[in-house]
Image: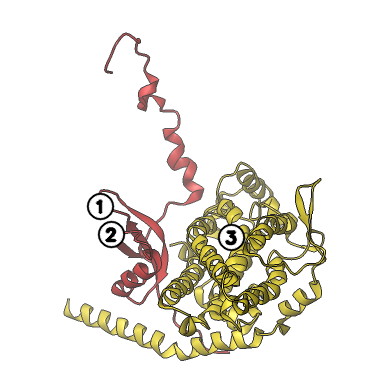
């Protein structure tokens, strides 16, 4: 309901609004008081743009995130695993839709958002540019990637922008089954034959570091953190969330009898946190720039799906228009 | 430059969680007509039995109040505290009131 009125809104607002500084102060004091900003409320343009960027990246990640796991639907080892995986991938698609809707409330159309993804101008989480060569990868993604995503997303349930926060509440509720089914797959493999256990270890080796990178660059180099925290789009810094994730995940790996692939990892009695080795930010930058193992393949798959579905979208619209014309004539 | 394609219209979705409760706004969806809007809303918003009934309405058909008029619209109710039962002091010994 929100997109249509937005264009005219700017002009309307200016009549009543005093000046930009007052508006901005009023906006910030609302945010400071933990009130929510809703689509038709006045907001600084930079706030709007930051949200469009963040929500659409998040939406694209959900959509592209269907691909690495979708790869295993036809080869899931049992009917139960297959039903679960289909449900999970369907959820990811749903999460993408909730988020696109939230982004649209900021005055950008769904078509524009999708075009940005397909043109490669919008980003999505770098994690989905890694391949899924074995079944254990499906377990590792659920356990680690969804685990990291939940850690990132729970604070966004209290984000200052209402539609984003509400979408996130739904997503977080649905996401916890994703993580548990992933851990269950890992548990089954870890308790299986030597070969299955090796497979689980191999998946952990490949997904551990990319999962840590999901929290984004170190606080010192993160260019958006300070402003986003002031606007309460973000509630914790990248490093804080990364640390939380490590602290809860390492004991889970120990429970599985698997080894976290970090020779420097150790428990620090004094801070009551794990200390981890250095992250290879060069790899992160490379994947982000489009040079990860699967960047090209992921985008090509999305473009093909979009192109091959075009006739369906057009036919459905043409049919609906014809029906409407017929109804008007009959009336 | 490809010519701007026509987008599927936007609909707002309202769901009744179970009978006895009101329909509540849950989000929006794109669809070519009402029938498709209901079907897509069912796929998107009721994957876990979240509802027993769905309403959809074209987003462009909704008229919303202007946040700029919020004061004029809602402030007048603020000082009418006599509309609330707690405004009236009744002695403790009077029961059932």
Disc 2 crowd, CA 10 A, few/some/many (<14, 14-19, 20+)? few
Disc 2 element: loop
Identify the residue shown where x is 35% and y is 84%.
A316
- Which dot marks residue A150? 3
Disc 1 crowd, CA 10 A, few/some/many (<14, 14-19, 20+)? few
Q: Are marks 2 and 1 in contact (CB under 8 Å)?
A: yes
For residue B24, side relative to residue A226 (left or right): left
Q: Position of residue A144 (x, y in %)?
A: 62, 66
- Which dot marks residue B45? none
State the separation of the CA atoms marked 2 and 1: 7 Å
For residue A267, side relative to residue A137 (left or right): right
Q: Mark 1 lies on which chain?
A: B
Tell which of A118 and A25 is nearer to you: A118
Determine which quarter of the picture holds residue B28: bottom left
Identify the residue shown where x is 44% and y is 75%.
A86
Among the two numbered marks 2 and 1 on one chain, the one whose residue lies closer to the N terminus: 1
State the separation of the CA atoms marked 2 and 3: 29 Å
Q: Where is residue A321 in the image (x, y as percent from the top left)?
A: 31, 82
Q: Mark 2 lies on which chain?
A: B
Question: What shade does chain B have?
Answer: red
Disc 3 crowd, CA 10 A, few/some/many (<14, 14-19, 20+)? many
Identify the residue shown where x is 45% and y is 28%.
B79
Q: Mark 2 points at which residue?
A: B52
| Quadrant of image for the C terminus of chain A | bottom left
Q: Are marks 1 and 3 in contact (CB under 8 Å)?
A: no
Q: Name the residue under label 1.
A: B19
In this rendering, is residue A228 above or below B47? above
Determine which quarter of the picture holds residue A309: bottom left
Q: The yellow chain is which one?
A: A
Q: Position of residue B40 (x, y in %)?
A: 36, 72
Identify the residue shown where x is 29% and y is 11%.
B94
């Amino acid at each position: 309901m929100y997109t249509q009125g937005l264009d005219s809104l700017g002009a309307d607002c200016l009549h009543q609004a005093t000046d930009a500084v007052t508006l901005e102060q009023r906006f910030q004091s609302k945010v400071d008081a933990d009130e929510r900003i809703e689509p038709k409320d006045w907001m600084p343009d930079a706030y709007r743009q930051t949200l469009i960027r963040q929500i659409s990246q998040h939406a694209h990640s959900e959509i592209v995130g269907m691909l690495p796991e979708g790869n295993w639907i036809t080869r899931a080892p049992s009917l139960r695993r297959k039903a679960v995986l289909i449900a999970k991938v369907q959820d990811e698609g749903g999460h993408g839709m909730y988020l696109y809707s939230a982004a649209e409330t900021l005055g950008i159309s769904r078509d524009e958002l999708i075009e940005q993804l397909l043109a490669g101008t919008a980003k999505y989480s770098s994690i989905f540019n890694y391949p899924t060569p074995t079944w254990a990868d499906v377990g590792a993604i659920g356990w680690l990637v969804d685990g990291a995503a939940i850690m990132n997303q729970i604070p966004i349930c209290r984000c200052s922008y209402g539609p984003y926060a509400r979408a996130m509440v739904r997503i977080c509720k649905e996401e916890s089954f994703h993580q548990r089914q992933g851990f269950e797959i890992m548990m089954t493999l870890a308790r299986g034959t030597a070969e299955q256990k090796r497979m689980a270890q191999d998946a952990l080796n490949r997904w551990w570091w990319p999962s840590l990178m999901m929290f984004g660059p170190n606080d010192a180099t993160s260019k958006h953190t300070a402003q986003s925290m002031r606007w309460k789009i973000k509630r914790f810094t990248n490093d804080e969330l990364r640390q939380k994730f490590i602290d809860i995940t390492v004991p889970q790996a120990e429970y599985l009898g698997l080894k976290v692939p970090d020779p420097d990892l150790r428990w620090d009695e004094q801070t009551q946190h794990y200390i981890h080795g250095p992250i290879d930010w060069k790899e992160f930058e490379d994947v982000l720039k489009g040079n990860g193992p699967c960047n090209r393949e992921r985008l090509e798959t999305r473009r093909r799906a979009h192109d091959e579905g075009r006739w369906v979208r057009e036919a459905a619209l043409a049919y609906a228009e014809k029906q409407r014309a017929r109804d008007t004539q009959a009336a | 430059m490809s010519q701007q394609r026509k987008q599927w219209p936007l609909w707002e979705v309202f769901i009744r969680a179970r009978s006895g409760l009101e329909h509540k706004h849950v989000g929006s969806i794109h669809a070519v007509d009402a029938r498709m809007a209901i079907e897509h809303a069912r796929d998107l918003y009721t994957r876990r039995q979240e509802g027993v009934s769905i309403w959809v309405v074209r987003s462009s058909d909704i008229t919303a109040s202007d946040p700029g008029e919020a004061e004029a619209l809602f402030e007048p109710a603020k000082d009418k505290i006599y509309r609330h039962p707690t405004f009236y002091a009744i002695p403790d010994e009077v029961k059932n009131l």
